[in-house]
Image (cartoon, helix red, strand yellow):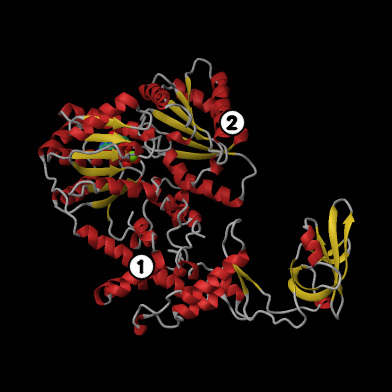
Amino acid sequence: MERLGLKRDIDLALHLPLRYEDETRLTPIAALREGETAQVEGVVTDSRVEARSRRQLVVHLADASGELVLRFLNFYSSQQKQLGVGQRLRVRGELRDGFLGREMVHPVFKAVEPGAPLPAALTPVYPSSAALPQAYLRKAVASALARAPLHELLPPDWLPPGLPTLREALHFLHHPPPGAPLALLEDHSDPAWQRLKFDELLAQQVSQLRSQRERAALLAPALQDTALPAKLRAALPFALTAAQERVVAEIGADLARPRPMNRLLQGDVGSGKTVVAALAAAAAIGAGWQCALMAPTEILAEQHFRKLVAWLEPLGIGIAWLSGSRKGKARRAMVEQVASGEAALVVGTHAVIQHDVVFARLGLAVVDEQHRFGVAQRLALRAKLEEQSLEPHLLMMSATPIPRTLAMSYFADLDVSTIDELPPGRTPVLTKVFGDGRRDEVIARIRDEVARGRQVYWVCPLVEESEHLDLQNATETHAQLGQALPGVSVGLLHGRMAGAEKAAVMAQFGGGQMQVLVATTVIEVGVDVPNASLMVIEHAERFGLAQLHQLRGRVGRGAVASVCVLMYTAPLSATGKARLRAMAETTDGFEIARRDLEIRGPGEFMGARQSGDALLRFADLQADEAWLAQARALAPRLLAEHPAAAQAQVDRWLGAKAEFLKA
Ligand code: ADP
Ligand code: MG
């Protein structure tokens, strides 16, 4: 039970049935219909083990109306005894017209005395695990429900009209009376369910608001320096776009305040977020503080590292590199530089948040592709930042915009800056959808591009279940292209390669010595090779839209007209076709994210699914937006007028999860 998060009485009371079984009624055997699940009661008239194709227990059960066969393919000898002739049974199962006539295969049964009363409520079926039998869980829930404190926390007139009390709602949902509207219960549209959704959202809103206020009371170093950012600007080979200027100003104003910034910088792939981060880093470093930049993959972190070294090292800034592949002495040396403050900028992967990394004066933390980090990792980052008395400023970057409902709830205290314009001189990528029967045509196209001095990516699909298959696919494609393109340097990049190996391949491709790069999705984010003008994505139907968009963003980074070929393997479903067509129709990442969200739902955006912790159990941010709005309106009032009730609401609903929601 503990593993299912069922510790307190209230946890059990809030552990709600997935569905119900109706054991409140008996159906006469003669009235049973094929395919119907029902409960009958009768007496065993015959019971024997038969050896047909398999040993099986065949039991005849009769009531006043007729007879039925119960068939068990697996059984214990104890069950054989329970099913002996003369035994009165209550049996629940699905009727089918089998080989032996009307029968139930493996029905649920129990011995009863004549005239034993029927249960007064539907029987709940709870989410459970193999180790936890339903019968045990049912008893535990029923007794916890009787004990749990379920008094109303809100003043009665605050509750939206039409909702039952919490006590009524829970008793109803655990033990619905016979004839309760099962369809409404199972699709959660019943008022009792609505009450739970509202309460859960209220708890979540109160918790958000509280952590927002706690954070507002924290102090951060005021980071204001104009000299170093100005030097960096002067050294840049391009001028900032108007959108970049605007977000740089927004971030600069936050940094200059003695309150920790909590800002999301969103901008489409290729919109130029890195240079904005570099300018923020320069402001922090110029003011005498350190900056940490964390990216979700080694390749992406490495790209940032190169770019930042090129931009900032000439200005005399010490930069450290921390990643999973840097170990031992080299790592220790880096960690020392971070601790002494000699490294003013620290770039890396999750390695940046490991416990042995202690910053001398961390003033700003930048997290790239923040949604790719799990909730737990973001929490670890925050904990790391809390080690010093002043909080650092936090800048998160993402190419995936936050949907409105999420912004309203989880990210209520997040400020958002948006880069809504691409740097000039980009030619939009032309996207083509091909069946993989046209592979030869695609390879001919590669030959042309290479002949023109351009470079090509070939992305192989992710085979979810098997990293091994992934690799095999990429390796085969690599060999095939090598053969089909004599004289062309074809490289291979995949997730199993060691960091140094990957870096070497990327360096060759980046430097132009390699013309074609076959890769698994390790190149998904952040790789920047402006001379690449063609991207082929194999089995494009297996990728998410946002992922395809990220991948496609690897080309069209220079002035060269670029093409992205989405290759699919027939047959393609109607939705599959629609999705690839959507990709061909728009290059607007925000529009793509919107469509993607419709398909995947917001949970995935939170990174919550990966880490296995659903943040909301009952409410759905999109479907229950109306409740969300009400909860949002009530939360500040509850905190102000009934602080103890507000606290109790959070404890009741979130318990240990409250910490999680702060991430
Ligand atoms: P993303 O927002 O996807 O992280 P990057 O920061 O990697 O995008 O920028 C994409 C490319 O555009 C980089 O090569 C970067 O140096 C370049 N770039 C950024 N800003 C500008 C600009 N204002 N003018 C021209 N090129 C720019
Ligand atoms: Mg980027």
Question: Who's the residue at 19% across and 56% down the image?
Answer: 218
Graded by Cα atoms within 10 Å as few (under 14), some (14 to 19) or many (20 or more), the crowding at tag 1 reads many
Locate residue 104, reporting x and y percent. 80, 65
Identify which amino acid the numbered label 1 is placed on. Val
Ligand 2 shown in quarter: top left
Question: Who's the residue at 48% across and 47% down the image?
Answer: 545
Residue at mark 1: C-beta within 8 A of ligand 2 = no
**Closer mark to the observer between disc 2 and disc 1:** 1
Graded by Cα atoms within 10 Å as few (under 14), some (14 to 19) or many (20 or more), the crowding at tag 2 reads few
Question: Who's the residue at 32% across and 64% down the image?
Answer: 207
Q: Which residue is mark 1?
A: 650
Give the side of residue 32 with respect to residue 385, left or right.
right
Secondary structure of the residue carrying tag 1 is helix
Q: Is residue 478 visible?
A: yes
Question: Who's the residue at 33% across and 47% down the image?
Answer: 380
Give the side of residue 385 with respect to residue 518, left or right.
left
Q: Which residue is mark 2?
A: 439
Count of marks overlaid on the render: 2
Secondary structure of the residue carrying tag 2 is helix
Locate residue 425, reporting x and y percent. 31, 36
**Of 621 and 156, the residue lying toward us:** 156
**Of 139 and 605, the residue lying toward us:** 139
Locate residue 59, reporting x and y percent. 85, 65
Please identify the quadrant where the C terminus is shown: bottom left
Mark 2 / mark 1, whichever is N-terminal = 2
Identify which amino acid the numbered label 2 is placed on. Arg
Locate residue 136, reporting x and y percent. 60, 66
Q: CA distance from mark 2 to mark 1?
A: 57 Å
Query: Where on the picture, by quarter, is residue 128?
Result: bottom right
Give the side of residue 46 with respect to residue 7, left or right.
right
